[in-house]
Image (cartoon, grey):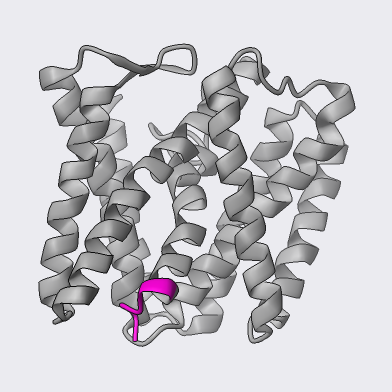
Amino acid sequence: MLLTRIITAAVLLPLVIGAIFFFPPVAVALLLAAFLLVGAWEWGGLLQLPAAWRGLYGLLAAAVLALLWWQMDAVPVVQAVLWAGVLWWVYAVVLVIRFPRGWDVGVGLRPVAGLVGLVILAAAFVAVLGVHGLPRGAEWLLLLFLLIWAADTGAYFAGHAYGARKLAPKVSPGKTLEGAAGGLVACVLIALVAAWWFALNPMQTVGLVLLSLFIAPVSVIGDLTESMFKRQAGIKDSGQIFPGHGGVLDRLDSLLAAAPFYLLGLEFMGVAG
């Protein structure tokens, strides 16, 4: 199992990094949309939709992403989608804390949960493309991935070494507060290196460090939220597209949550100019 995960990661990482740096914007958008549409299919599975309805849901998601791609230059539209995503992830914190007393996705709530899925995918789509479109956008986008990986890796090692207090035992028993703290430290270190790389001034450096301290817990919320939905659906993985890693949602859950906050943070703090 571990070997399979390593092989899959070794194949995917160079492809993703190569796409970020060398693909034209149109190709990046199409590749991102392809992954997110697989994610839409998997989201339908989390909602326990029949195959036909999952297909229709995927078509609806494709239409939404195509419309947003067409409207990427419309700042009010992009901002509205980003903030809709942010509001959902803030609410998701409440759901994770209250689980399993929170939102049970039964038949009556499936339309609402379907809308939530579209908001999540749409916000991530415009956020990733927005970051990629910034000056030195490929580097800023790579930094987002590095922060997410640092949060996850730092949490893994700190949790195994010092983990004692559970972070969300009813959602993900393996996560600990000590692990989350390790993820924060790892993100700050990455942010400091990035500040040197981008030659940021002191105020921009402080802004980037603060943003990294925000991205770390948000990425954890993305992970926990997907775990919550999987527990409600009674499944271990959202899909099997990546051998040893599960589905698209299993791999991109943290990115889906972090991307809108990241783009808004870069814009607000002025570190992407």
User: Relative to 170, is 223 above or below?
Assistant: below
Residue 73 inside the magenta-drawn segment: no
| Displayed quadrant of residue 108 | top right
Q: Residue at x 58, y 29 (%)?
A: 94
Q: Residue at x 81, y 34 (%)?
A: 51
Q: Residue at x 23, y 42 (%)?
A: 184
| Residue 92 percent location from the top left of the image | 58, 36
Observer-nearest residue: 269 or 254? Answer: 269
Specify whether residue 74 is in view. Answer: yes
| Residue 170 percent location from the top left of the image | 48, 12
The rendered magenta stretch, by its main secondary structure, is classed as loop
User: Relative to 194, is 96 above or below?
Assistant: above
| Residue 18 percent location from the top left of the image | 32, 71
Residue 102 lies left or right of residue 220; in this view the side is right
Query: What is the span of residues highlighted in magenta in the rendered image?
Result: 268-273
Indicate the quadrant containing the N terminus: top left, top right, bottom left or bottom right. Answer: top left
| Residue 75 percent location from the top left of the image | 64, 82
